[in-house]
Amino acid sequence: MLEILAAAALAAQPLSRLPAPEANQGVAVDARHVYAVGNSEIGKYDKATGAKVATWKGDPDRFPHLNSCAVIARELVCASSNYPSTPMASSVEVFDPERMVHTRSIALGPQPGSLTWVDRRDGPWWAGFANYDGRGGEPGRDHRFTTLVRFDDAWRATGSWTFPDTVLARFAPRSSSGGVWGADGRLYVTGHDLPEVYVLEVPATGSVLRHVATIAVQVEGQAIAFDPAADRVLFGISRANREVVAMKLPAVEEE
């Protein structure tokens, strides 16, 4: 309890807002550009000027729900699902961010939920799988079944973790919509609606992630991305305003 109360005092500093009509699901960032992600579209914007430089639009029947994207090894790697359809089906969709074209799809097959975000750290892939209490959920599973899965290069699961009750209570009745590894080796995760980022650690033993801190932010959940060119600058979106928001996160002290 003391840890969570102390964490509530942490708050991000707002830096900038960029209008982006595609900003419905999340944002990805590289050294020069931000990518506003919608269900079936991605807008590419110059980070320095805010000018839109390219747009990708997909067939909604083929790409019904891009949940998030991340710039990884010169590719734009996106988490895609068939939300709100069930049974849940997910894939990883890969784009060339220079040409803004779709290059390949990785079907994941049956998983413990709906893929909402993916990142890479120290070799393995890490992915968040959402479960919901209502629309888009499956019988017998609710938000408490939200799961972090680690994959190898062949997309075979090599480990999985559940979320602590202190974070699940903030997800309810939805789930995790965004997640990204920080330079400090911690996992930064968002829910679906609340203006909060949850700082987590993978435990040395056990299967429940450790809740280190909660940071108040200027975005209402959804997918997030760290700026690779700036220390602790996090990008997110405001769905209501269709904006990409940049924020400076406070340091999270070691215990």
Image (tube, rainbow, N blue to C red):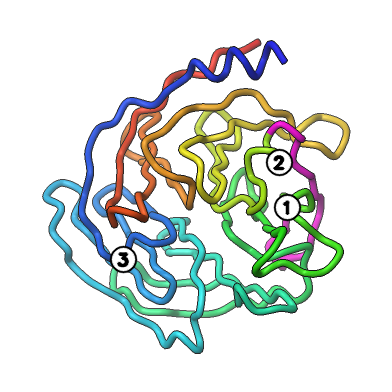
Residue highlighted by disc 2: 168
Q: Position of residue 40 (x, y in %)?
A: 41, 76
> From mark 3 to mark 1, how far is it between C-alphas?
27 Å
Indicate the quadrant where residue 15 lies: top left
- Separation of residues labelled 2 and 3 (CA atoms): 28 Å
Q: What x and y, as percent, mark residue 168?
A: 71, 41
Quadrant in which residue 26 is drawn: bottom left
Residue 74 or residue 58, whichever sits in front: 58
Q: Which mark is residue 22?
A: 3
Q: Residues within 10 Å of mark 1 (few under 14, many from 20)?
A: many
Q: Which residue is mark 1?
A: 143
Of callouts 2 and 3, the N-terminal one: 3
Q: Are marks 1 and 2 in contact (CB under 8 Å)?
A: yes
Classify the position of the C terminus by image quarter: top right
Residue 66 lies left or right of residue 33; in this view the side is right
Task: Indicate the position of residue 134 as horizontal and vertical percent values.
Answer: 69, 63
Earlier residue among tags 3 and 1: 3
Question: Element at badge 3?
Answer: loop
Provide the residue span drawn in magenta.
Answer: 151-166
Q: CA distance from mark 1 to mark 2?
A: 7 Å
Q: Tag 3: residue type?
A: Glu
Q: What amino acid is labelled 2 in the image?
A: Leu
Mark 3, residues whose alpha carbon is within 10 Å: few (<14), some, or many (≥20)? many
Left or right of 30 on screen, residue 20? left
Q: Of the residues tagged 2 and 3, which is closer to the observer?
A: 2
**As drawn, is 111 to the left or to the right of 184?**
right
